[in-house]
Amino acid sequence: MVCTCTDSQPLVETKATADENPMMADGCCCCCSGDVDIMCRPWYAVNHRKPRQANGENVEVKYEKDDATYLGGIVDGKREGYGVYKSNIETYEGQWKNDKQHGNGKHSWNDGRSYEGQYLNGRFSGKGKMVWTTDKGIMTYEGDYLDDAKHGFGKFTWPNMNVYEGGWQTGKRHGKATFTTHQGKQKVGFWQEDKFVRWEAEENAVAG
């Protein structure tokens, strides 16, 4: 069953029969909202004179954009609780709140990126791990996020296995950190706005 929805159609369930509502068949109701098609299994009987928004723990949603689907919790027509979203460019599996990723989740993209960690109102926030797959190899970041940016303390590893572990601010290396080469050599230094400032040993030498 495929429904065609318009922006003016609310996300509702109705008690109409298949004859009254050609979008409903086989015990399922189709509830439209914007560019989404909702297939409720099982559908919930509602007084057709006072329709309400869809609710359920295992609701399937089909989006026209990006050939996407969602299967999971719906409360008042919005994604809530656990759910899986898939499209031709990305997949997200995890918690939702008020139609946004919120809580713990796993996110992967077709360009080789993947993220596993915490979300707040649809953004990376809290503890998380991002992996990038590039032509040169794999890069990883594991640590703190705030509003989709590396922020706080985190560890970044390049494809050549050099490692930066230390402070971050709004996505940039900032503050004190330990830099480890692929050969295992370590130095403690300072960065500001993603630019290297000096090594700690140099600072100590000046102070001495």
Image (cartoon, helix red, strand yellow):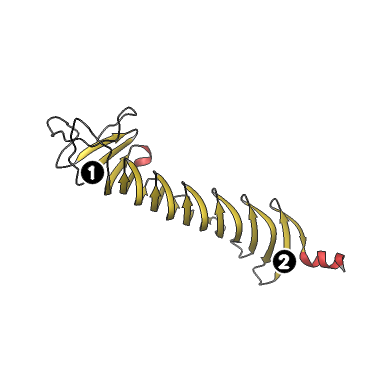
Q: Are marks 2 and 1 in contact (CB under 8 Å)?
A: no
In the rendered image, the vertical position of residue 89 relative to residue 203, given as above or below: above
| Amino acid at the residue labelled 2 | Val
- Name the foreground residue: 71 vs 56: 56
Horizontally, residue 8 falls left or right of residue 124, namely left
According to the image, label 1 marks what residue? 40
The part of the image, by quadrant, that contains residue 78 is top left
Query: Which residue is rendered at x = 68% and y = 65% of the image?
Result: 179
Pinpoint residue 77: horizontal percent, then vertical percent: 32, 40
Q: Is residue 20 visible?
A: yes
How many discs mark residues in the rendered view?
2
Horizontally, residue 120 falls left or right of residue 39, namely right
Quarter of the image with the N terminus is top left
Viewer-nearest of discs 2 and 1: 1
Secondary structure of the residue carrying tag 2 is: strand
In the image, farthest residue toward the top: 8
Query: Which residue is rendered at x = 77% and y = 63% of the image?
Result: 199
- Name the foreground residue: 44 vs 181: 44
In the rendered image, the vertical position of residue 186 relative to residue 24, given as above or below: below
**Which of the two discs, 2 and 1, labels the residue nearer the N terminus?**
1
Residue 188's disc number: 2
